[in-house]
């Protein structure tokens, strides 16, 4: 498919949801960026509201059904759905960058024009990130167990959390 | 009370960003760098349970207190503060409006010179900010980078090999860094060139905001220029990107001032003198009008049109006449009408010149 405004291939498929009916746009990268950049006369856009407006109004590279399916995807660690992220413009946990990787990439490219960090890195290896992610998941499970008054399970979870916290803190790998 | 002593101490000093010194300080008010960081083993703040949030706040505060380099920080429990005290910290740019207005466990550590502050549980677990008077991004980066190293030795940051520092909002991912320079650009406003300047800044993906950040009006002709992009460029490149454009803006502003002096010196002198006259004589005055008039006076001083007043005095008035500051200085709560009277009195006292010189000529 060709871009609506030029001869280049359309790599961005945007569904505009703000009007009374769905508007499908097929654009090349340059025209997509132009389209997504706020008009000059408007007061300066705030970076965070940029994501908000993008996530609320635009769905990039997806058909309506794909989007509906995508919206229901949930991070197994913190429990946030992609729909919720699109609405509030804030992610739920560090693992979202992994589990929503493919969905976030076009958004990140739109904002930053890049996909790879260059610059400062933490000096020390910050332990095993899988276990840190596991701590997030376990704490959520603990919270749910307490809400459901499953106190035995809650106590098991507390012990497990303490064990992993101890190992992470001592720099060891809980295996 | 410990808290009152801390806050009262701040009212007595002017804060780093309004000291009115440092390179190019006639136009550049301050340089600021902030880093967004998150702990690897907790959800981002919005997704935290109350319990998580309290645990994050305590963990970070304890670790920071452990650092010899950071143990002079004054910690304030923002959740416990009165609304006027929160507003006071926002006016001083020590905390963001978001931190002031959100809920749940959250705090701020402030260094006694107000150069450096660290917010806990704002949008990200940690927001580390360093402010310098005038144009001084390099040393702001040196200092905030060192502080970041110290904190990193105590906590595990959420970091992704490809995406860098992970943040709650994808607009901050990568370096997590926002570099901003606050400029006073009254002549560009008067000559109606400011819009043109801003649209060209936006084309090179720099953001322009008002004095109090996101969504705020450009009160008193103060504008903050900052980077939008945080991923794919190193910290040094991001600093250079903002730093390179500032001298251009300074040059535009100076040329606009020269133009005004050359083409309409009398009008300009009149405008500045009237502003000064109102500020010295008003019996009741709003915050907006004060900011607007102080802006003219500030430019007038820089152009030698108002002798006998120092720039730091005016800088300080910008902040001391803000609503929460007036109330803290006065020591009582005041409604809008009373604040406007108090503000007028405060301005009269602080703008009065030495008897020998006056504004008659
Ligand atoms: Zn095109
Ligand atoms: Zn998650």
Image: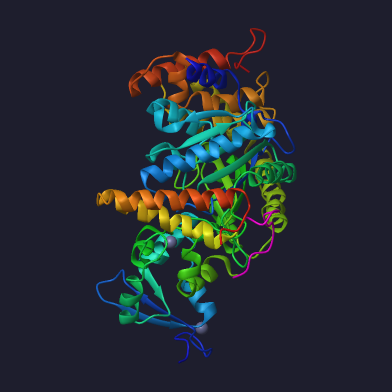
Where in the figure is residue A128, as x and y percent of width and height? 59, 60
Q: Is residue A121 magenta?
A: yes
Where in the figure is residue A30, as x and y percent of width and height? 54, 78
Quadrant of the image occupied by residue B109: top right
Q: Residue at x 60, y 24 (%)?
A: B14
Q: Give the magenta range.
A: A115-126
Where in the figure is residue B297, as x and y percent of width and height? 58, 28
Does residue B276 appear left or right of residue A27 in this picture? right
Tell me the quadrant of the picture where the N terminus of chain A can be found.
Answer: bottom left
Residue closest to the eye, B107 or B278: B107
Residue closest to the eye, B351 or A88: A88
Residue closest to the eye, B143 or B47: B47
Q: Name the residue furthest top.
A: B355
Q: Main secondary structure of the magenta part?
A: loop
Residue closest to the eye, B22 or A74: A74
Does residue B134 appear left or right of residue B54 in this picture? right
């Amino acid at each position: 498919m060709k871009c609506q405004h030029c001869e280049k291939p359309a790599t961005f498929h945007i569904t505009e949801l703000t009007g009374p009916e769905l508007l499908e746009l097929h654009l090349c990268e340059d025209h997509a960026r132009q389209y997504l950049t706020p008009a000059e006369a408007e007061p300066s856009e705030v970076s965070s509201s940029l994501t908000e407006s993008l996530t609320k109004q635009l769905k990039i590279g997806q058909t309506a059904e794909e989007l509906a399916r995508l919206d229901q995807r949930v991070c197994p660690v913190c429990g946030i759905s992609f729909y919720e992220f699109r609405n509030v413009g804030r992610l739920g946990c560090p693992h979202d960058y992994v589990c929503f990787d493919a969905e976030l990439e076009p958004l990140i490219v739109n904002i930053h024009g890049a996909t790879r960090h260059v610059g400062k890195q933490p000096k020390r290896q910050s332990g095993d990130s899988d276990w840190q992610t596991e701590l997030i998941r376990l704490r959520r499970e603990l919270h749910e167990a307490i809400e459901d008054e499953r106190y035995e399970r809650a106590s098991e979870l507390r012990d497990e959390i303490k064990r992993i916290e101890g190992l992470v803190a001592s720099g060891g790998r809980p295996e | 009370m410990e808290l009152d002593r801390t806050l009262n101490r701040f009212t007595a000093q002017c804060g780093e960003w309004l000291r009115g010194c440092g390179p190019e300080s006639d136009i550049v008010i301050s340089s600021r760098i902030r880093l967004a960081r998150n702990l690897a083993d907790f959800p981002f703040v919005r997704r935290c349970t109350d319990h998580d949030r309290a645990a994050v706040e305590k963990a970070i505060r304890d670790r920071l207190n452990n650092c010899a380099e950071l143990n002079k920080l004054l910690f304030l429990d923002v959740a416990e503060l009165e609304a006027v005290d929160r507003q006071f910290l926002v006016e001083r740019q020590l905390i963001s409006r978001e931190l002031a207005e959100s809920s749940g466990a959250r705090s701020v550590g402030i260094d006694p010179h107000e150069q450096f502050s660290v917010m806990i549980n704002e949008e990200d677990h940690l927001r580390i900010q360093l402010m310098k008077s005038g144009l001084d991004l390099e040393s702001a980066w040196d200092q905030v980078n060192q502080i970041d190293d110290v904190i990193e030795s105590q906590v595990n940051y959420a970091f992704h090999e490809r995406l860098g520092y992970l943040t709650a909002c994808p607009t901050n991912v990568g370096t997590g860094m926002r570099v901003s320079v606050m400029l006073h650009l009254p002549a560009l406003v008067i000559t109606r060139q400011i819009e043109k300047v801003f649209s060209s800044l936006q084309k090179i993906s720099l953001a322009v905001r008002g004095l109090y950040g996101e969504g705020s009006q450009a009160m008193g002709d103060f504008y903050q220029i900052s980077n939008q992009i945080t991923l794919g460029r190193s910290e040094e490149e991001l600093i250079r990107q903002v730093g390179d454009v500032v001298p251009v803006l300074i040059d535009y502003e100076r040329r606009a001032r020269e133009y005004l002096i050359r083409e309409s010196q009398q009008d300009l002198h009149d405008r500045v003198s009237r502003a000064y006259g109102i500020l010295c004589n008003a019996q009741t005055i709003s915050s907006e009008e004060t900011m607007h008039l102080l802006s003219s006076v500030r430019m007038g001083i820089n152009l030698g049109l108002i002798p006998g007043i120092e720039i730091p005095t005016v800088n300080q008035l910008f902040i001391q006449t803000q609503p929460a500051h007036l109330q803290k200085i006065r020591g009582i709560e005041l409604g809008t009408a009373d604040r406007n009277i108090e503000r007028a009195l405060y301005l009269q006292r602080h703008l009065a010149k030495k008897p020998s010189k006056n504004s008659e000529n």
